[in-house]
Amino acid sequence: MKIDITFNVYTDAIGGDPDRTSPTLRSYHKMLWSKKLPNGEQFDLTDKISGVYLFHGSRLGDLLLGSDAITHSYRNHKRKTWLTQQIQSEVQELFDTGSTIEHTLFSKHSADKTHNKSSSWSK
């Protein structure tokens, strides 16, 4: 799969938050971040667990991952309207740029709060 860095993730988000509903963004994250780690361990991500954005489970432990944009245009913030109306084209440009692969993964929390290395999640 090739990553289109210009793809607007809102176009397949079905009107929702792309961090939750864009299958393209999720597949890009899965492809980009599933890899061999410097310690030699394989970090594989799955999107097959209902209600979980991406999941990693191995002898290293279980990890739930989420996605979030790394830019913010404040386009829809009512309290900042006084500013965003003055620079509408710049706000739109930032919003459009931030609507591409410019999202990042983060750890939501450990899936295994007991730190037991055996996974209780069905994969």
Image (cartoon, helix red, strand yellow):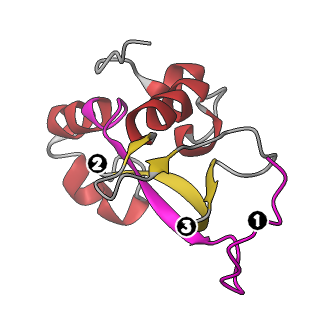
Look at the image and give the residue range highlighted in magenta: 97-123
Residue drawn at x 54%, y 28% is 27
Question: Residue at 36% of width from left, 18% of height from top?
Answer: 3
Q: Earlier in the sequence, mark 2 or mark 1?
A: 2
Q: How many residues crowd around disc 2 within 10 Å: few (fewer than 14), some, or many (20 or more)?
A: some
- The numbered mark, 3 or 2, whose residue comes first in the sequence reads 3
Image quarter of residue 95 = top left
Label 1 environment density (alpha carbons within 10 Å; few <14, some 14–19, many ≥20): some
Kindly identify which numbered label has been placed on residue 60: 3
Q: CA distance from mark 2 to mark 1?
A: 39 Å
Q: CA distance from mark 3 to mark 2?
A: 37 Å
Pointer 2 residue: 73
Q: Nearer the viewer, residue 50 or 92?
A: 50
Q: Residue at x 35, y 29 (%)?
A: 100
**Residue 44 place in picture, x, y as percent:** 54, 43
- At mark 1, the secondary structure is loop
CA separation, marks 1 and 3? 10 Å
Q: Is residue 106 left or right of residue 20?
A: left
Answer with the quarter of the image where residue 18 lies.
Answer: top right
User: In the rendered structure, does residue 121 fall within the stretch colored magenta?
Assistant: yes
Q: Are marks 1 and 3 in contact (CB under 8 Å)?
A: no
Residue ranking furthest to the bottom: 114
Q: Residue at x 52, y 19 (%)?
A: 11
Foreground residue among 115 and 82: 115
Q: Which mark is residue 119?
A: 1
Q: Which image quadrant: the N terminus? A: top left
Tell me residue 67's x, y (percent).
Answer: 49, 51
Mark 3 burial class by Cα count in 10 Å: few <14, some 14-19, many 20+: some
- Kind of residue at badge 3: Leu
